[in-house]
Image (cartoon, rainbow, N blue to C red):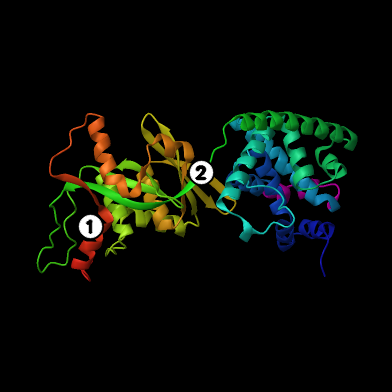
Amino acid sequence: MILSDADLVSAVRRGDRDAFGILVDRHRARAAGLAAAMLGDFGEAEDVAQEALYQAYFGIDRLRDPTRFAEWLCGIAINLAKMALRRRRMTFSLEDLDGGRVPRGLRLEDTTPESEFEAHELRETVRRAIGQLPEDMRAAVWMHYVEGRSYQEIGALFGIAPGTLRVQTHRARHKLREALIGEWGKRVQREEVTMIEVIVQDVLLWLPQDWEPKLAEGEKTYPETPPSEKCAILLKEQDGDRALPIWIGAHEAEMLVLHLAEIQTLRPLTYDFMARLLDAAGVKIDRVSVSALREDTFIATVTIRAGQLMREVDARPSDALNLALRARALIFVDADVMERGKSVRVADAPRTLVERAREEGEAVEEGYAWRSGREIALAQKSVSEDKPC
């Protein structure tokens, strides 16, 4: 037989701790959800929910109506969340929430990187708009429009007459409309941003034309590292022959080349180790984007997901791309960045880079050329077959 909340409260008052455990299972998620709606931080919301349950357990004798345990617990959680907001003096954030209800007919298998990106942008817009509401309006808006609670339920929880609450939420909705219209107006005025899907085509190395790797005879070691001080990664558009060249460091270039050539090492390299750590922690790299070009410096963004939590992290392109390859994540380049970054045709890349250097007055060493790091690594791999590092 399923016991009511009132029966469980009575049992708790008689000293039955298991009865309170059932109450926790029933209502903890809702209390944590309300706290998250106000705080914008799931970790902090869990702490608030835990504290609310602690206070409810030791203060259960103060509950006048045992049938309203859920509302009473949520009221405690809301008050604790308000106190937390006052302590940190931060605006409301829905940073950790990837949305409210799932639209009817939506199937996760039908989603695309583009649709996820658009949904993320929309969520951020709504988050900023809700953050502009007065503190008391935030929880009421969340409960009514996201949880679907009636004005009577919310009014009883906050101690506000349903009619007054209806007026408040109407005003809040009006404020949200004004904020969203303003935000979307700015978005419409901005030039549409197009993300181009790309692949890591190759890593070019500036090497002597006659340089060849040597394998120490009788040693189980990988051939010497190419002595290149200039390295450029080529990001080729998925459905075209343009490629964006990006200068990277020699170490990062070597890590990319080893992965492109599918060369196995005895121990995991740094980026392999990082990818395994993220995977062990349940963190998924959704995509990597070369999203900006500032003062001749490329900026990359790594989008990661852990459950419902999504974050964007700025990174060097060389680091982001090394991780993307190992995580099998999609890679994108902003269309404007592709244009401003002086893209090249893949087949012409070595010659074009030399010509550009000369046009810009740079010294070009005689007897040197841009060579394919992938081809060099594959050749080395065939020489050192079955001889891992």
In the rendered image, the vertical position of residue 239 relative to residue 140, given as above or below = below
* Res. 195 mark: 2
Amino acid type of the residue tagged 2 in the rendering: Met
Q: Residue furthest left?
A: 217
Q: Magenta: predominant secondary structure element?
A: helix
Instruction: Give the quadrant of the C terminus.
Output: bottom left
Write down the region rendered in magenta. 53-66
Compared across the picture, whether 134 is left or right of 324 comes to right
Inspect this view and state whether residue 389 appears.
no
Is residue 368 in the magenta section? no
Where residue 384 sits, quadrant-wise, is bottom left
- List the residue tagged with mark 1: 376
* Res. 70 mark: none
Compared across the picture, whether 305 is left or right of 351 comes to right
Q: Residues within 10 Å of mark 2 (few under 14, many from 20)?
A: some
Q: Residue at x 78, y 56 (%)?
A: 13
Q: Dot 2: what SS?
A: strand
| Disc 2/disc 1 C-alpha distance (Å) | 31 Å
Q: Where's residue 109, x and y in %?
A: 62, 61
Q: Where's residue 127, x and y in %?
A: 65, 37
Q: Nearer the viewer, residue 103 or 23?
A: 103
Q: Where's residue 296, x and y in %?
A: 36, 31
Q: Dot 1: what SS?
A: helix
Inspect this view and state whether residue 329 appears.
yes
Q: Nearer the viewer, residue 301 or 3?
A: 301
